[in-house]
Amino acid sequence: MTNIGVIGGAGYVGLVTGVGLAALGHKVISMDLDQSRIEMLRKGSSAVYEKGLEVILRGLIKKGQISFTENQLQAVRNSDVLFIAVGTPSLDDGAADLSAVIAVAEQLREMIDKYTVIVVKSTVPVGTTRIITEILAQKLTESEDFDVVSNPEFLREGEGLIDFFAPSRIVVGSSSTRALEALRTIYEPLLSGNVVVDVPWIDVDREIPYVETDVISAQLIKYASNAFLAARISFINEIAGISEKVGGTITDIVFGLGLDPRIGSSYLKPGIGFGGPCLDKDLRALIRIADENSYDSVMLAGVLKRNDLQLREVMNKITGTLGPNLYKKRITLLGIAFKEGTNDVRQSLSLRLYRLLRDQGALVVGHDLLAASETAEIEPNLVVTSDMNVALDGANAVVVLNAESAYSSFDWSSLISSEVLPYVIDTRGVVDVTMLSNCGITFDVLGSAE
Ligand code: UDX
């Protein structure tokens, strides 16, 4: 059992990591500056939605495996290993904003009073661990008082528990054998298959690859992974665009493409592009890292450009059918979170589409099963309902943005008696188009000719 502190423990990554480590049998103290989130967490409820998380959290609180505090000193003094999971948002120029990470390092420099392993979970540019080390070394001695480790996260929102308890791999980077040993001990229950989590959808019965490397490579593994996923999405979006022009059917193309085992079928779903807090941010940061090192990353720039163009495709379709004047046109957006299964609206492309439509005078209504209150915080004028009938009432156009099962199973014939039948754009290929046809509803599926 290791005493572990998590700094930034109320954010998505910090929370899933803290809960996961506590479930492995460690004693976790999670610290966050967000007092209201910490108070909620103490009572076993989380502001970030993750399927199954609260049940595990409450069990761990009861057993005394995890506790929550706003007091960083308390977390530091009670821990041998500290995970830093504070945010690193994108700055305007694409670089990662390291101010929170730097502030934590400056505070730790004053607080650490025994050998402590500092584990960087936040995705930070190559070189940041050196900055952290330099800050700590102003008062402490590397190897004697502290070591810094990079242990990137690969948590998909909505599938965070699977990615913690049955990860595709664990990557740990450090030049200190003592620190590497500490991390191995922490993950040992996962590696030896000893951890028991009562979550039926997680297959823990699997050998987990464990990659030990240097700090820089660990960080680049993270950036390369997200850039590669982003590249697959931009690639299929470009193929979808070509397919539409020449009369193909994108679902069949994706199916045929994915059958090649060298390619596989994951991350090949076309849509409005990759949104969310990570792929876009990490891709921009990687391009910036290349730039700063005088390397021309042409391919990564293309991935980003395609993503920026995707919304234009949707706007063109809307104006192509409803006409260039969208003033007072009622447009329904199905799926406001950046993907289905989450309440996270940060960098949601649905919200970007909302702003484009709003700016042209359209009356936009949103539908989302989880993200209504999160949307209200960012866009108070966008009404988001979880009732499909309310959302679709009087709609001139409907844009399906997430692959929610409520959208694939929706009975469009319920709209037949409406005064206006909406024009439907399915950006995810999930709607029953035969039903749309039978109902006389005009539609487009992104990537497929009519
Ligand atoms: C991502 C990475 O997957 C995870 O490993 C990393 O550590 C954090 O960032 P997440 O941001 O939760 O996870 O989202 P993800 O499921 O990867 O989806 C990102 C975006 O790509 C979403 O907008 C999603 O709708 C879109 N997407 C995904 C597609 O458009 N097509 C696909 O085939 C897959």
Image (cartoon, grey):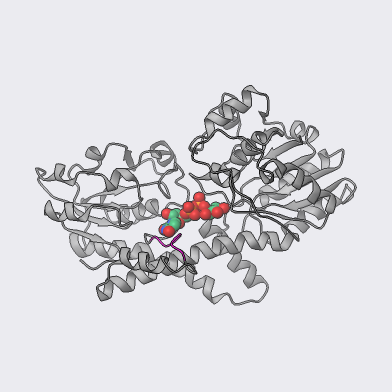
| Quadrant showing the C terminus | bottom left
Question: Hey, which quadrant is residue 443 in on the image?
Answer: bottom left
Magenta-colored span: 264-269
Q: Name the residue at 36% across, 62% down.
A: 311
Magenta span main SS: loop
Name the foreground residue: 405 vs 210: 210
Name the foreground residue: 192 vs 164: 192
265 is within the stretch colored magenta: yes
Percent across and percent down for residue 352 are: 39, 54
Q: Name the residue at 73% across, 48% down.
A: 119
Percent across and percent down for residue 423 are: 19, 55
Question: Hey, which quadrant is residue 324 in on the image?
Answer: bottom left
- Is 268 drawn above or below residue 348 in the view shown? below
Question: Hey, which quadrant is residue 273 in on the image?
Answer: bottom left
Q: Name the residue at 17% across, 44% down.
A: 394
446 is within the stretch colored magenta: no
| Quadrant showing the N terminus | top right
Relative horizontal placement of residue 132, taking residue 276 as reference (left or right) = right
Percent across and percent down for residue 447 are: 30, 66
Relative horizontal placement of residue 131, taking residue 224 as reference (left or right) = right
Relative horizontal placement of residue 319, taking residue 188 as reference (left or right) = left
Percent across and percent down for residue 98 are: 66, 53
How many marks overall? 0
- Is 53 drawn above or below residue 133 in the view shown? above
Q: Name the residue at 52% across, 58% down.
A: 279
- Is 412 drawn above or below residue 295 in the view shown? above
Q: Is residue 365 visible?
A: no
Q: Is residue 361 visible?
A: yes
